[in-house]
Each structure stands twice: as C-alpha cells, then as structure tokens.
Image (spheres, grey):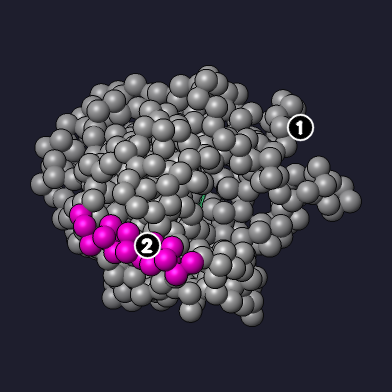
Amino acid sequence: MGTVRLILGDQLDFGIASLADIDPENDLILMAELKTEATYVKHHKKKIAFIFSAMRHFAEECRLKGWNICYIDYDNPDNKGDFISQLQSVIDVFSPDALCMVEAGEFRLRQIFTEFQLETSLPFEIRKDTRFFTSEERFRDWADGRTQLRMEYFYRELRRETNVLMSEDGTPIGGKWNYDSENRVSPDAKKHIPSPTKIKPDEITKDVIALVVSRFSDHFGSLESFHYAVTRKDALLILDKFIEERLINFGTFQDAMLVDEAWMYHSHIGLYLNIGLLSPKEVVSRAEQAFYEENMPLNSVEGFIRQILGWREYIRGLYWYKMPEYANMNYLGLTAPLPDFYWSAQTDLKCVSHSVAQTRDHAYAHHIQRLMVLGNYALLTGVSPEQLNNWFLSVYVDAYEWVELPNVSGMVLFADGGILASKPYVSGGAYIDRMSNYCGSCKYNVKKKTGENACPFNYLYWNFLMSHEDKFKNNPRMGMMYRTLSKMSDENRNQIQKDSQIWLNADP
Ligand code: FAD
Ligand code: DLZ
C-alpha cells in the first residue's frame, strides 16, 4: 500500500499540502471523529456538530473523486478515541509504506505528532501549513529583536508584500493605512440589518446533530436552528452574501451591538476560514475586488481586510512565536474564578446576559462582545487566564487555541505584559452604552458611577486602575486615566473601592 494521509478536522481544504501529491490508486486518506478532540475542552454542541458534519461532507467529496478514504465516525466500533491510537490501528490493518500530514494548528497536537514521528519506524512526513499569507518563520524574522510586537506594523508590511489595497507608488490606497476613526459609529436600531444567510441542514448534518444530542448532552449550548454551512460551496455562498449585503456597513458599525441582533454587519466566516472551507487569500481578494469593481467603501473594505490580513495573521504568528510559554502567562496575577453566569446567562448585567445568551444559542458573538463586554468584565473582575481561556475555547464555533489564546490572554487579560497590546482593553459602562442599546433595559444605571444600582463596570474600571497602578501608571497611553484618578477625592476613591469589594465578594 502507499501513503496514509491524515486530514485533521480543521484541514478540510483540497489545496492542503498533505494532498498535493496524492496517488489515488494506492494512498489512503484517514479522518476520524475522536473523543479526545471533542472533549479536551467541552466544546459547544454546535461546534462539534459543525466540525463533524463538515468532516463527513469533505469525506464524501473525497469518495466522489474516487480516492480511498478511511473515515472513522464517532460510534464506529473501530474508533480508538485519539489520533495516535487511530493512526496505529490503521498502520496495523493496512501496512502503509509511509505517513503524511500537515502540521496541526495547536501546540498540544504538534507535540503528540512530533513524538509519534520519532517513535514510528515508518517514514512520516509532517508538512508546513501553507494556508496562511505568512509562515511562522516570516513572523519570527519580523518579531526577533523587537520589544513591542504591534499588529499595525506587521500588517503594513504584509500590505506592501501582498500589494493588497496599495497604489503603484507604494502608498496605501486612499492615503491612509487605517480608517478606524470612521469605524466607531454607534448603532442605529432603526436601520435594517440583513438576516444572516442560513443553510438548511441536510441528512448528514441531521445525523450529526442526533449524535451530538446523544453523546454530548452535558456540553454547553443549544443545537436549535443549526444553519452553518458545512461545505465549501455553501461557505462561498455565505461569503458572497456578506460582500453583497453587509460589507457596505461592516466598517461603520464594526463595534456596534444591539439587543436581539447577534449578526450585525459582520461576515460570520471565521468558522469557515479556520477549518479550511474558505481561504484567507480568496476572502481578501474578494473584498479587494468589491472595492475596485463594486464601489464598496474603503473604510469597510480596509477594515475587513485588516481583520484577516492583519489580525488573523498576526495572532497566528504570535501564538507560534511565544508557545508554549504564552499559555502560562499571567502578568497581572489574576486568580478569580469565572462567574457561573458565563454559562447560565443569569445576571442582571444586560450586556453580559445578552452576549452569553447569544453565545449559548449560536456559538457566536462578534469581536466587541467578546472583547469589550465578556472580556472586559472578566479583566475588571480578575478572572484567571486558565479559566477564561477554557471558556472562550469551548463556547465559540470558530475557536482553536492558536487564535483563541492570544486574543484572550494577550488582548483581553494583558497576561503577556503588553506583547500584544500597548494597554489593557478596559472600559467603564459609558463605552458599552455608546456602542450598544444594552444599557437602556439594564437594572444598573450606566450614568451612575458609585453607590446603589450604579453600573458595576463604572466602579470596577477605576478599581482596576487603582489595583494595578504600579504596573500601568507610567504607561504613556494611560497617562490621562491616571491623571484623572489622581484628581479624585479620597472619598470618591474609597467609595469606588468599597463598591468594588462588595461586588467582587458577592455572587452577582
Ligand atoms: P468579522 O468581524 O467579520 O471579521 C472577519 C474575520 O477577521 C474573522 O472571521 C476572523 O477570521 C478575522 N479576525 C477578526 N478579528 C480577529 C482577531 N482578533 N484575531 C484573529 N482573527 C480575527 N477568532 C477566531 O477565529 N477564533 C477564536 O477563538 C477567537 N476568539 C476570540 C476571543 C476573544 C476574547 C476576542 C476578543 C476575539 C476572538 N476572536 C477569535 C477574534 C474575532 O472576535 C472573531 O474572529 C470574529 O468575531 C469572528 O466573527 P466574524 O467571522 O463575523 O468576524
Ligand atoms: C475541534 C475538533 C473537534 C471537536 N473534533 C475533531 C475530531 O473529531 N477530529 C479531528 O480531526 N479534529 C477535530 N477537531 C479539531 C482538532 O481538535 C484541532 O483543533 C485541530 O486539528 C488543530 O489543528
């Protein structure tokens, strides 16, 4: 027999390097729905259904191409439960000449496969993942010797290298690298927001949903109204609909949040990018084309491209540059447990309860809900990186450690001491009020700074600054905040600390 080619659940791309030289006559593709992968954190039910269904559809397409495939579904009696046992069992049965795969996207799995590569007597080729704009080595070359690793500068280099949205004279189209000043507009609750594109589950997806109901009933989240794409064809449809219907307002309302409106003008494609149903290069090209040929506004197109060419590439580079240390960083020494309402949504804090309920229902929340509501609250109340990372990795359909960890530890918790962010992303209630309509229906008064019924984000914000004054008071980007704090009366400061202690000691 030829080569066994292992395809992981987030490698569902026919352009993947491990399939480049497949010999359809002699090679065997191996894919497996594994207990270790479905439970190393208790993934949201919709995330498991999404991955298993997309894997089964990909396997179907392999069969249609006439390729040999060994697909081990979850209830198959030959399912060994983890990658290495499964690989070993396939080796025992088929006696291949060689093994081949693309490197895993998570550190823990890379270690496991590298160890097996050393142990096995078979030639085992682990190829580079070429699905990104940049390689890990490219990021390392850029990062080595720098004290600060700001996304903005990495992004500018990539814009130049890829020639995306660049003029012939080497300057950015429109003359500016960044249109964020136009992109922080408060939401308009009366403006029509297009409904998200919904894909009807087919028989394969229905089978998988039934499997998830029976096997993962104790996992977080709802399986109701599953509508995610599970094939490349449908993922492309969702991308097209985004470009047609939402991109025009993506930039302007990028940070906006509305009650009962989960989807806003976001693209909802992260889940497809992360498992290979869409490629970042094609998505960026499509957005660029919409600017040149379809009159889409530059603030939206640049803002969207920045997320993918900038943030996504940068986050991946940082993850591999700093792992494994990154996973254990805790610069601020945060130790508080995650509040139960991150699972139940039972809290009077409307912004938090809406964001958690939406996460429970869709395994989705957009960036500002993750960062400035759920992340902000966790940082202000000192939730430990371990607990918060576990939550974020479990609950979102697009979550994989390479992208989740730097966002949570670096962007939300400042656990890396400022490698990713120049200052912590903290805010009081005023920011949430400006960017959403959550506060109008909240029990707490966002205009009140302290005392009974004051919005807890308000006093917790100043309490955070006081608690970590030694770490941040000389941070040039926080000078204004600390000047305001220094002008506060002792009475005010004491009240803030008292309210915060009451809140932090209670179980809100
Ligand atoms: P859009 O807002 O439409 O953005 C387009 C695309 O840009 C996204 O699909 C994504 O691929 C990329 N992107 C945007 N922001 C980021 C970012 N900060 N890092 C990396 N890529 C980005 N993204 C994940 O893919 N997986 C995660 O597990 C994840 N965890 C996050 C945790 C926290 C605390 C925060 C603050 C952000 C996290 N993000 C994560 C980034 C971002 O929130 C999601 O990519 C985005 O909300 C997905 O929805 P969308 O496809 O509608 O994105
Ligand atoms: C996230 C996930 C889940 C839930 N299940 C599987 C699985 O059964 N089989 C598989 O090959 N991959 C799965 N994955 C993705 C992996 O856990 C992991 O995140 C990626 O393979 C890292 O590259």
Q: Is residue 415 visible?
A: no
Residue appearing at x 28%, y 75% in the figure: 119
Residue 501 lies, with reference to residue 41, above or below; the image says below
Q: As shown in the figure, which amino acid type bears the numbered disc 1?
A: Tyr
Mark 2, other Cα within 10 Å: few <14 / some 14–19 / many ≥20: some
The quarter of the rendered structure image containing the N terminus is bottom left
Residue 28 lies, with reference to residue 147, above or below; the image says above
**Mark sitting earlier along the chain (1/2):** 1
Q: Is residue 346 visible?
A: yes
Residue 133 in percent (x, y) is at 61, 54
Residue appearing at x 71%, y 57% in the figure: 156
Q: As shown in the figure, which amino acid type bears the numbered disc 2?
A: Gln
Q: Which residues are magenta?
A: 489-507
Give me the C-alpha separation between circle 1 and circle 2.
55 Å
Residue identified by numbered label 1: 292
Element marked by disc 2: helix
The foreground one among 143 and 275 is: 143
